[in-house]
Every structure is written in structure tokens, then in C-alpha cells.
Amino acid sequence: MKDGAKSVDRDDRDLLRVIRFSSAFSLGLMAALLFSVKQVTPDLRCELSAGSGIAFLVGATFSWLFWRVVFKVDKPGKRTGPGKRRVLFAALSVLLSLATVAAFAFALKGVGNEKLREIIQGTLLAVFALSGVGFLLWRIARFLESDSKRATEDTLPDTKK
């Protein structure tokens, strides 16, 4: 039984690493790409520079820290209270959101008013659609967790006898 528990713990840890790495890599790549955009109209022009590398590292670091807080990974011997974790989670959420909006706005600095209006409408539509999908996934996850808990409780032998 212990080998099975160790295997599950190892699998969970590996999955968390994949989630943290892929999220950090993609957010860092997005930050670097948006920093590299120098001109949008009439042609798209990107320039890779040291700033692109710094933007990648900053985006990846903040994403890694964010998921570390979300998955409650503490360093050995150091415990973080739930209040401090909530404040850190909120601060990182706001910071990542603002950084994403700032990078997006920075990339659109050379776009005309007519085109800008269309881009904002499309962006808002995408945000609403993705928010709806996120809400549905959240509800499905809650349902599956409660169903799993219920199934586990039903299969446990009665120890009160």
C-alpha cells in the first residue's frame, strides 16, 4: 500500500511540475513576444533584444511563483499561514493580470483608432468566452471532486462496529 501512495505522490508532484513549467514557459514567451513587437501597422515588425530575454524571465518567474502559491508548495521546514497565502495569491493575481494588460497595450501602441476598436471588441469577446469556459471547467472539477469524495466514503469499511 505504501508503494502505491508513494507512486501517487510522485505522479502528483510530476504533474505539478509540468503545469508550473508549461505555464511559466508560455507566459514568459508571451511577455517576450509582446515586448519584441515594435510596429503593428502597416507591417508587423518584431525585434529580439536583451529586453525580450528579461521580459521572458520576469514573466516565467512570476508565473512559477503564482502556481507555487496556488498549489501550496512550501519550502521544507517553512509553513505559510492561510492569511498570508491569500494575500500573496491576490497580489500575484493582480500583478500578473496588470502585466498581461500592460504588455498587450504596449504592443498596440501604433494601431489606429478604427483598428483599435475592433481589436478591443475581439479581445473582450475572447475574454468573455474564455471566462465562460473557465467557469464550466471549475464547476465540472467541483462536481468530480465531490463525486470522488462520495464514492470514497461509500467504499470505506465501517470502523464504528
Image: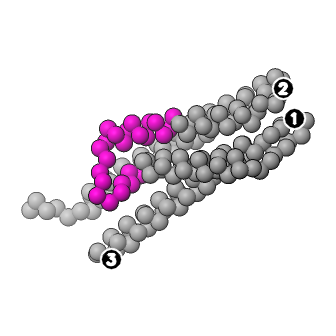
Which numbered disc, 2 or 1, marks the residue that appears first in the sequence?
1
On the image, the x and y values in percent for residue 14 come to: 47, 66
Which amino acid lies under the numbered mark 3 shown in the image of this protein? Asp
**Is residue 154 or residue 99 the one in the foreground?**
99
Residue in view at x 87 percent, y 35 percent? 41
Q: Is residue 152 above or below residue 105?
A: below
SS under mark 3: helix
Which numbered disc covers residue 41? Answer: 1
Q: Nearer the viewer, mark 2 or mark 3?
A: 2
On the rendered structure, is 76 left or right of 27? left
Q: Are marks 2 and 1 in contact (CB under 8 Å)?
A: yes
The quarter in which the N terminus is drawn is bottom left
* Quadrant in the picture for residue 103: top right
Q: Are marks 2 and 3 in contact (CB under 8 Å)?
A: no
Residue in view at x 48 percent, y 49 percent? 65
Which numbered disc, 2 or 3, marks the residue that appears first in the sequence?
3
Per the image, the residue denoted by label 3 is 3
Which amino acid lies under the numbered mark 2 shown in the image of this protein? Gly
Crowd rating for badge 3 (residues with CA inside 10 Å; few <14, some 14–19, many 20+): few
Per the image, the residue denoted by label 2 is 112
Residue 109 seen in the current view: yes
Q: Are marks 1 and 3 in contact (CB under 8 Å)?
A: no
On the image, the x and y values in percent for residue 111 come to: 82, 30
Q: Which residues are magenta?
A: 71-94
On the image, the x and y values in percent for residue 137 come to: 52, 45
On the rendered structure, is 116 left or right of 8? right
Residue in view at x 13 percent, y 62 percent? 159
